[in-house]
């Protein structure tokens, strides 16, 4: 973020009602676009939505192939679209992406299915929707369907399958449930789910790379059904080599526990900001970093809405839990540095040091006396937790 002199104006941050400061998005500055935010935290929280402005100002960005591509493999036709990019880890994108998958017109589509933009109305950060019984029943249904789709996709994971093949499985399972995969064309995201491998924190685009024995992969599934959205994700071990890696297990199982501990604290009256304290405290016992850029969120008839749910300690999350609200908690935890970097595809977020990252997410309903996990695991859900290895670190101080 760069500073620039400017008269008072409204901050364009997600669900933000503050006046903007002199902090300007550097990309917008270079493009000659006025875009001033109230704070660094607000800019980071709003990045996923804000970066679409950069694409909208360059109408050719979504229809032209990348300007620089590596040599195409003559046998497979595959290539790395960003060969000169300084990747932080060993993972590389494997293009070309498959053609955009089609949802039958008979299935209700969200507004972004054609335009790519949600066009949601402005909502104050503390304006939290409380659902009636009809809305709660609809959320229970779409979240159950979302769990079914995630479990189907997870059951197909094995060394050698590509994340694009997983995307086809997800897409087909959504259609079978008369549901639209919420990510598809959301802010122009090209696929029906996010597959985030190894150092990818979130928003990985499914491509032609086969999963390898030893990888970990997060599958993030969201469905739109009968006017409501469900959202969940889990991180899985690919092959026995992944399960035998002590660092993988320490990372994945601690992240799972971070979510469980935060959920156990949900009940009416609890401040949203408290979940980050719980998550970071537990992550630090295993010397792990907590990603600060991305947050959990409200969800109902809107895919993303108030409240924002930060996952790090001493955050400034707004609001308290109220019976009838639905929202996600989705901590992203790394083996190393908590800072992130985004690939040139404007979606794939990776750890800045190339260390591995894991994430787990549930959609939650606040009840009169506690919480209902709408996307709860089933007895036969793939990806059961496994024991910590003896090498697990305890009582660490965490990355700086």
Image (cartoon, helix red, strand yellow):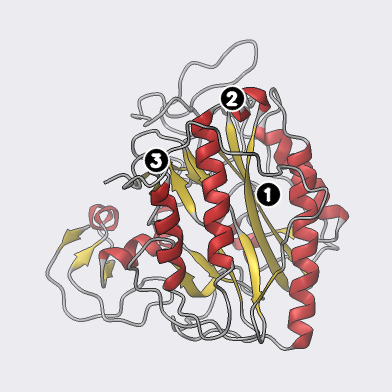
- Which of the 4 image quarters holds residue 195? top right
- Can residue 290 be spotted in the picture? no
Q: Which residue is mark 1?
A: 192
Drawn side of residue 236 relative to residue 13, left or right: right
Drawn side of residue 186 relative to residue 49, left or right: right
Mark 2 lies on a secondary structure that is loop
Give the x, y percent position of residue 365.
66, 75
* Residue situated in front as seen by the camera: 109 or 143: 143
Query: Quick check: marks 1 and 3 in contact, CB under 8 Å?
Result: no
Mark 1 or mark 3, which has the lower sequence index?
1
Drawn side of residue 138 relative to residue 196, left or right: right
Label 3 crowd (10 A; few <14 / some 14-19 / many >=20): many
Q: Nearer the viewer, mark 1 or mark 3?
A: 3
Q: Which residue is mark 3?
A: 351
* Residue situated in front as seen by the camera: 242 or 192: 242
Q: Quadrant of the N terminus?
A: bottom left
At horizontal 64% and vertical 10% (from top left) the residue drawn is 75
Query: Quick check: marks 1 and 2 in contact, CB under 8 Å?
Result: no
Label 1 crowd (10 A; few <14 / some 14-19 / many >=20): many
Give the x, y percent position of residue 130.
62, 87
Query: Quick check: marks 3 and 2 in contact, CB under 8 Å?
Result: no
Q: Which mark is residue 214?
A: 2
Mark 1 or mark 2, which has the lower sequence index?
1
At horizontal 61% and vertical 72% (from top left) the residue drawn is 299
Give the x, y percent position of residue 66.
46, 33
């Amino acid at each position: 973020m760069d500073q620039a002199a400017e008269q008072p104006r409204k901050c364009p941050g997600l669900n933000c009602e503050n006046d903007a400061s002199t902090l300007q998005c550097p990309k917008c500055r270079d493009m000659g676009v006025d875009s001033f935010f109230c704070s660094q935290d607000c800019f980071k929280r709003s990045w996923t939505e804000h970066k679409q402005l950069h694409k909208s100002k360059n109408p050719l960005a979504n229809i032209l192939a990348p300007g620089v591509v590596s040599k195409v493999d003559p046998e497979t036709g595959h290539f790395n679209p960003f060969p000169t990019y300084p990747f932080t880890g060993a993972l590389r994108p494997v293009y070309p992406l498959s053609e955009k998958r089609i949802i039958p017109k008979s299935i209700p589509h969200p507004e972004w299915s054609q335009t790519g933009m949600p066009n949601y109305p402005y909502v104050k950060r503390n304006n939290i929707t409380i659902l009636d019984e009809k809305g709660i029943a609809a959320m229970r249904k779409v979240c159950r369907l979302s769990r079914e789709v995630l479990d189907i996709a997870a059951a197909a994971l094995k060394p050698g399958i590509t994340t694009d093949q997983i995307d086809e499985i997800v897409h087909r399972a959504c259609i079978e449930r008369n549901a639209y995969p919420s990510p598809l064309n959301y802010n122009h995201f090209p696929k029906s789910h996010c597959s985030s491998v190894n150092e990818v924190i979130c928003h990985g685009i499914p491509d032609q790379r086969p999963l390898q024995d030893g990888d970990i992969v997060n599958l993030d599934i969201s469905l739109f059904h009968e006017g409501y959205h469900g959202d969940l994700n889990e991180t899985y071990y690919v092959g026995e080599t992944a399960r035998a890696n002590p660092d993988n297990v320490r990372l994945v199982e601690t992240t799972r526990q971070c979510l469980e501990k935060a959920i156990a604290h949900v009940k009416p009256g609890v401040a949203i900001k408290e979940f980050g304290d719980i998550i970071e405290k537990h992550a630090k016992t295993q010397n792990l970093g907590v990603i600060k850029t991305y947050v959990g969120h409200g969800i109902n008839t809107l895919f993303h809405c108030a409240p924002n749910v930060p996952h790090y300690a001493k955050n400034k999350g707004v609001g308290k839990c109220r019976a009838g609200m639905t929202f996600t908690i989705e901590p992203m935890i790394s083996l190393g540095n908590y800072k992130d970097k985004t690939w040139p595809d404007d979606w794939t977020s990776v750890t800045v040091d190339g260390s591995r990252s894991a994430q787990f997410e549930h959609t939650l309903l606040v009840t009169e006396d506690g919480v209902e996990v709408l996307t709860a695991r089933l007895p036969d859900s793939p990806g059961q937790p496994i024991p910590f290895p003896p090498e697990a670190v305890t009582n660490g101080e965490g990355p700086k």
